[in-house]
Image (spheres, helix red, strand yellow):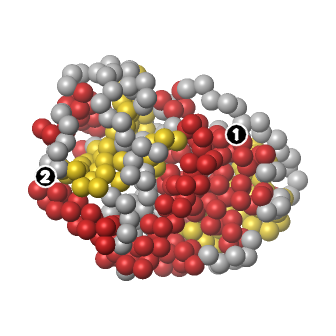
């Protein structure tokens, strides 16, 4: 059954969409953070750009996520150093720290720079945290080790890393604001406008940007082996006593939550309750996962809260958990930016901008990290 996120259920300013159906230089498919970011950069450079969104701006993962704005990728920094090499890992983390600064400027009160907490649920995870802490310190990134946790976290977790440069988003409000910036810069945006590749080719004079993350395989079937749709589930409670002033995550981010300034707890994850069932793009919640989320919410709050919203969203997962950003399909017209593997709030802003810059003829070195040719 289709679900509505807490973020999308709030009053949101409508996107004052204006668009024509004449051919345009660049067509962007998808109105999430990636597509809006791409449209903004292109429009600011004077390129004629039209963004086509099947539903409404931010109705995909960008308006359904946990609202964590974290630096880095979908794995810890020490792991990134091993997988990518220390230089590339540092480059990736620097890109996302710079992007967090840009997000802060663009998002206004939809972003709070409150840091984030990565928690250790057992000894194994505590040593994983220590390894990330050491690697971040070695390379000059801000991070703090936290041994003494406040109740009730002290009974549930062993230690934490505080990442002070991270923050919390109201993701739907943020992405609508980004869309408004793109429109102000000259981009056209058409909502309720689903297209396929044939239609996109007809409309685009120069380039097509596929910015549909969890729907990448559906839009470009040749990428199906490389971008798998994965569903995540979330709930939000009625306002309760404020205990968590910043986003928290634990068990390798299988559990995550943030509390909003009014006390509402937004909590998601527990996908490990049924991995196979969650390998889908179908919107809907399941008892197996929502029950686990209820149990976690009660443990974190000390009593069973009243739940106001339950929802799901879908992201694109790649084999190496890094997004694909670049040309695909053999020709030179089709570009992709997606596959953030559940970590796209900051990377999506960065990659939308990067794909636009590539279309403009720039070659930012950091783009090589995301080159689809590494997989495709
Ligand atoms: C439950 C959940 C929790 C998450 N938590 C976090 C988090 O806390 N932090 C974080 O960094 N990341 C998180 N993510 C990941 C993050 O939300 C995504 O990676 C990011 O929003 C992707 O943005 P996007 O613009 O690429 O794609 P989306 O936001 O998914 O936008 C794609 C858009 O394309 C549209 N579309 C699809 N097909 C077509 C078509 N044929 N024609 C026109 N339009 C089309 C869709 O309607 C959709 O609006 C989470 C994701 C989910 C689902």
Is residue 9 placed above or below 358 in the rendered structure? above
Q: Is residue 317 visible?
A: no
Residue positioned 31% across, 77% down in the render: 82
Numbered label tally: 2
The residue that label 1 is drawn on is: 192
* Label 1 – label 2 distance at C-alpha: 46 Å
- At label 1, counting other C-alpha atoms closer than 10 Å, the crowd grade (few under 14, some 14-19, many 20 or more) is few
User: Splitting the image into 4 quarters, where does residue 114 fall?
Assistant: top left
Q: Is residue 18 visible?
A: yes
| Residue 215 relative to residue 360: left or right | left
Q: Which mark is residue 122?
A: 2
Mark 1 element type: loop
Image depth: mark 1 or mark 2 in front: 2
Q: Which mark is residue 245?
A: none
Confirm or reject: label 1 Cβ below 8 Å from ligand 1.
Answer: no
- Observer-nearest of 371 and 109: 109
Mark 2 element type: loop
| Residue 183 relative to residue 1: left or right | right
Residue positioned 79% across, 51% down in the render: 185
- Observer-nearest of 61 and 157: 157
Residue 93 x, y percent position in the rendering: 44, 66
Residue 352 x, y percent position in the rendering: 62, 60
- Observer-nearest of 226 and 359: 359
Residue 50 x, y percent position in the rendering: 77, 53
Residue positioned 51% across, 37% down in the render: 170
């Amino acid at each position: 059954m289709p679900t509505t996120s807490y973020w999308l259920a709030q009053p949101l300013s409508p996107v004052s969409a204006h668009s024509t159906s004449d051919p345009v230089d660049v067509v962007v498919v998808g109105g999430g953070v990636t597509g809006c970011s791409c449209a903004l950069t292109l429009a600011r450079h004077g390129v004629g750009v039209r963004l086509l969104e099947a539903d409404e701006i931010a109705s995909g993962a960008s308006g359904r996520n946990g609202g964590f704005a974290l630096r880095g990728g979908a794995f810890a920094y020490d792991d990134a150093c091993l997988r990518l090499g220390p230089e590339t890992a540092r480059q990736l983390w620097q890109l996302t720290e710079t992007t967090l600064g840009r997000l802060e400027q663009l998002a206004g009160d939809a972003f709070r720079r409150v840091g984030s907490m990565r928690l250790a649920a057992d000894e194994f995870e505590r040593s994983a945290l220590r390894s990330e802490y050491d690697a971040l310190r070695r390379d000059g990134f801000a991070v703090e080790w936290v041994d003494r946790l406040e109740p009730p976290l002290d009974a549930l977790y062993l230690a934490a890393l505080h990442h002070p440069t991270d923050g919390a988003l109201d993701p739907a409000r943020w992405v609508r604001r980004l869309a408004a910036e793109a429109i102000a810069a000259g981009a056209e945006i058409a909502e309720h406008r689903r297209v396929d590749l044939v239609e996109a080719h007809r409309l685009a004079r120069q380039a097509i940007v596929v910015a549909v993350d969890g729907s990448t395989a559906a839009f470009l079937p040749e990428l199906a082996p490389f971008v798998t749709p994965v569903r995540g589930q979330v709930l939000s409670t009625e306002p309760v006593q404020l205990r968590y002033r910043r986003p928290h995550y634990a068990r390798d981010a299988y559990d995550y939550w943030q509390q909003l300034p009014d006390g509402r707890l937004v909590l998601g994850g527990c996908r490990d309750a049924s991995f196979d069932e969650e390998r889908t793009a179908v919107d809907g919640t399941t008892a197996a996962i929502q029950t686990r989320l209820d149990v976690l919410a009660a443990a974190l709050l000390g009593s069973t809260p009243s739940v106001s919203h339950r929802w799901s969203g879908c992201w694109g997962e790649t084999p190496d958990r890094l997004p694909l950003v670049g040309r695909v399909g053999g020709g030179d017209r089709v570009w992709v930016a997606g596959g953030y593997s559940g970590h796209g709030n900051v990377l999506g802003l960065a990659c939308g901008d990067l794909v636009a810059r590539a279309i403009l003829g720039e070659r930012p070195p950091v783009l090589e990290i995301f080159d689809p040719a590494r997989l495709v």
